Amino acid sequence: MTPIPDIFLDTSALFAGIWSAVSGVRMLLKLGEARAVKLHVSSQVLTEIEAVLRRKSPESLGSLALLLDRSRIKITPESSPVHLRQCESLVDYAPDAQGLAAAWTAVADYFVTLDRKHFLNNQVMQATIPFPVGTPGDCLTWYRKGFVSSAN
């Protein structure tokens, strides 16, 4: 039996999933709903996304709640102090370091983000952490190669 991958969504990815019904993140949310993947966010990601939506689109808060429920997103435990220190040395923006540390502590198989500055263009960080970091499209490609093709 093929294992079900654990995928961590950061705030930028979750935000994109709310804004676009046809985005790569929305496909990941549908895979979560189908129980083909296990989706995770940290409590900090939820706090950030709620603050952003209250500021930019308060009418979208209901959509957020619905998407979180339908896609079965789990909230990760607090990150370990060791992972947090490591991530703070790799990512120069504290909230992003906290999110990355939460994914590491949760033993994520993939970290999904749209943040180029702190994650996607950070080669040192990507070479250090034990899981891939990429866009929603990158994650879907990874998923298809490792989990869909092996199931056939």
Image (cartoon, rainbow, N blue to C red):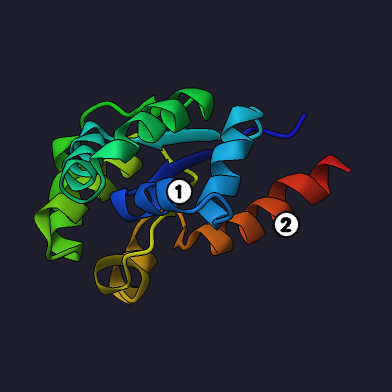
- Residue occupying the point 40% across, 34% down: 63
Q: Residue 54: horizontal and vertical position, in percent?
A: 18, 41
Q: Residue 101: horizontal and vertical position, in percent?
A: 25, 45
Q: Is residue 140 left or right of residue 134?
A: right
- Dot 2: few (<14), some (14–19), or many (≥20) neighbours within 10 Å? few
As drawn, the residue found furthest toward the front would be 59
Q: Is residue 83 placed above or below 70 in the rendered structure?
A: below
- Dot 1: few (<14), some (14–19), or many (≥20) neighbours within 10 Å? many
Q: Is residue 66 left or right of residue 99?
A: right
Amino acid carrying label 2: it is: Lys
Q: Earlier in the sequence, mark 1 or mark 2?
A: 1
Quadrant where the N terminus sits is top right
Q: Residue 30: horizontal and vertical position, in percent?
A: 61, 38
Using the image as rendered, state which of residue 86 and residue 115 is in the foreground: 115
- Residue occupying the point 81% across, 46% down: 150
Q: Is residue 73 visible?
A: no
- The label shown at residue 17 is 1
Instruction: For marks 1 and 2, give the one nearer the viewer.
Output: 1
SS at circle 2: helix
Q: Residue 43: horizontal and vertical position, in percent?
A: 23, 31
Q: Quadrant of residue 103?
A: top left
Disc 2: which residue: 145
- Residue occupying the point 48% across, 42% down: 7
SS at circle 1: helix
